[in-house]
Amino acid sequence: MDVVDLFKAESKKELSRICKEITVSKADLISLVRLSQESFDIFPYHHAFKRRESTPCDLNLTEKNLAAFENNDPRELRKAFNKLGQLPIASERASAHLFYTLGHSYWHLFYFDIRDRASEKNHWAGGSHIHYLSHLCVTRGCQEVWTSFCKNGKRGLENSGFHIRFQP
């Protein structure tokens, strides 16, 4: 069983079973992208990719924070370093791969952020993973789901879809 089996599934129950059994790698995603570009007769899906980065406004360094590096002000330096320390934790660096047919009737979305791919200390007990959604998982359409990810990243897709083990 492999990632291509997701595209053959006919029910949400079947998707759930497949997602529990497979492990997806970076090479698998690259292969799907290549298939979508080269073999439309075999793999009738188009591909879209989106990388989204956002930093909470309160973590942007202020003029006062930047000046602390020149003035060597310990209190302001501490504030600046605290903000810098929070950047990797609070910033979102999410990516999504959407595979869809003409007319968007059939679609499959793989998405993740940097924290999901960490082998430890992420929100899924199974470790490193990616998220998966398809036309069989949600009542929202392809364009609505894609727009939601593009505007809000993973937050726009919370509480829907499946986790799949990821092997870097």
Image (cartoon, grey):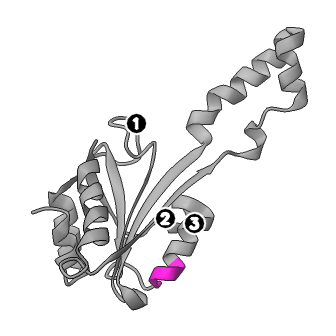
Label 2, residues with CA under 10 Å away: few <14, some 14-19, many ≥20: few
Residue segment shown in magenta: 140-144
Res. 150 mark: 3
Quadrant into which the C terminus falls: top left
Res. 158 mark: 2
The amino acid at mark 3 is Cys
Quadrant into which the N terminus falls: bottom left
- Name which residue lies at 83% across and 10% down: 74
The amino acid at mark 1 is Lys
Residue identified by numbered label 1: 121
- What whole-number distance in Å separates the C-alpha atoms at marks 2 and 1? 19 Å
- Name which residue lies at 22% across and 74% down: 39
Q: Is residue 18 magenta?
A: no
Is disc 2 in contact with disc 1, using a CB cutoff of under 8 Å? no
Residue 102 figure quarter = bottom left
| Foreground disc of the pair 1, 3 | 3
